[in-house]
Amino acid sequence: MAFGVGLSIGTVNTVCVTAADHSARRGSSPFAARKGSPPTTWRTTLTFDSSGTARVGRIPRHGRVITEFADLTQRGAPVARVGHRALSAADLVATVADSVLEEVLGKAPAGQNAKGDTGITVTHPAGYSASLVADLRTALDGIGLAEVDLLPEPVAAAAWLAAQRGPLMPGLALIYDLGGSGLDVTLVRVGAGAPTNPIVGLPLHSTDFGGRAFGGLVAGRLRRTPDAPVISRVFSDTDTGELRTENIRASLKLVYRCLRIADVTMADVDRVLVVGGAARPPEVAEVLAKQLARPVTVAPDPERTIADGAAIAARESVLAQDSGGHRHHVLADLFRRVTRVAAL
């Protein structure tokens, strides 16, 4: 049997999802996660107790909590000192992965993963340079997760699309990832004949959109201003929907920029896949479908799509190994072309 675990560590939330081979026998696995438990979500925060043990997702009333470390491209990313150890942002991400995997799998993941029937994939932004991916790889290796694979987030999303809506015709998919801290737009080749590095052009990122940015827009509308001395403290659903529609329309500039860099148009794109925790409201898919005039796919819970795809990729890697194929040490080795992020 084959079992995959997918982990998506975002700035706001961390999601862990499992995917079992349909041929697996009930009760054949020692892992608690193999009992069909639902995916689990944590806040991407870290605390350390006096012994140096890490805890994920807690926001204590007293004591230090470490946040805002998951994006390795950010300057001045938090560095923690635990005992005599100095932990970089990459080390903190690896610590989250280790803690979550241990909680989900019921025991330390590294030893179990060595049995060969379990694959684990951790995703990362497609805009990471080769150096940042290497930093994350080194941090995972150093914490005992050498067998964990790395995969770009939009490639994991495309793996979910292929598994759920496939077989896909060869073509281009636009991955629109609207998360809590920002928007990522990436073009990915899908279907038979897709290259080993399916990312086309450059992945683009902007913090002008997403959950936090939209919250700022709402707060701005509610804030008292000199030209509006009296303001209602009630922001209706209609007001929220209209503001979100306006915000998603504004985000299309990032989509069109992504297309220009790749030297393609929307006529070359076959479908749009919408993922991310801030993509749940229906206005997101509605605006994209209307403005881009392409089929739009949204999972029932778009926040877990990337982790779902990572789990599927991990499971398929194990199945390929079981069938006599060669399993790559790191799935991201398939995508060696260095990409850079173009931040607005």
Image (cartoon, rainbow, N blue to C red):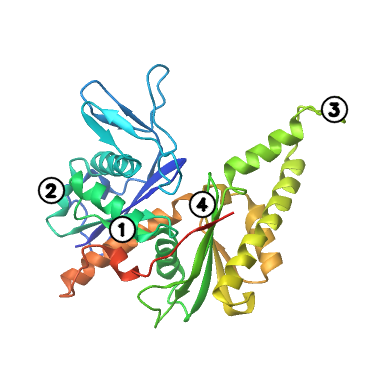
Q: Quadrant of the N terminus?
A: bottom left
Apparent side of residue 11 relative to residue 29 in the rendered image (left or right): right
Residue 72: x %, y % from top left: 40, 47
Q: Which residue occupies the foreground of this view, 60 or 282?
A: 60
Compared with residue 186, is residue 217 higher up or lower down, i.e. above or below?
A: above
Q: Going from the N terminus, do you reach mark 1 or mark 4 first?
A: 1
- Note whether residue 9 is visible: yes
Mark 4 and mark 3 in contact? Answer it, CB < 8 Å: no
Q: Secondary structure at mark 4?
A: loop
Q: Quadrant of the C terminus?
A: bottom right
Residue 291: x %, y % from top left: 71, 66
Residue 3: x %, y % from top left: 24, 58
Q: Which residue does the numbered mark 1 point to in the structure image?
A: 150
Compared with residue 2, is residue 18 higher up or lower down, i.e. above or below?
A: above
Quarter-of-image position of residue 152: bottom left
Q: Mark 1 or mark 4: which is in front? A: 1
Q: Which residue is painted at 51% across and 75% down in the image?
A: 172
Q: Going from the N terminus, do you reach mark 3 or mark 2 first?
A: 2
Q: Secondary structure at mark 1?
A: strand
Q: Mark 3 or mark 1: which is in front? A: 3
Q: Which residue does the numbered mark 2 point to in the structure image?
A: 111
- Mark 1 surroundings: few (<14), some (14-19) or many (≥20) residues within 10 A: many
Q: Which residue is painted at 69% across and 40% down in the image?
A: 217
Quarter-of-image position of residue 154: bottom left
Q: Which residue is painted at 71% across and 65% down in the image?
A: 290
Q: Which residue does the numbered mark 3 point to in the structure image?
A: 226
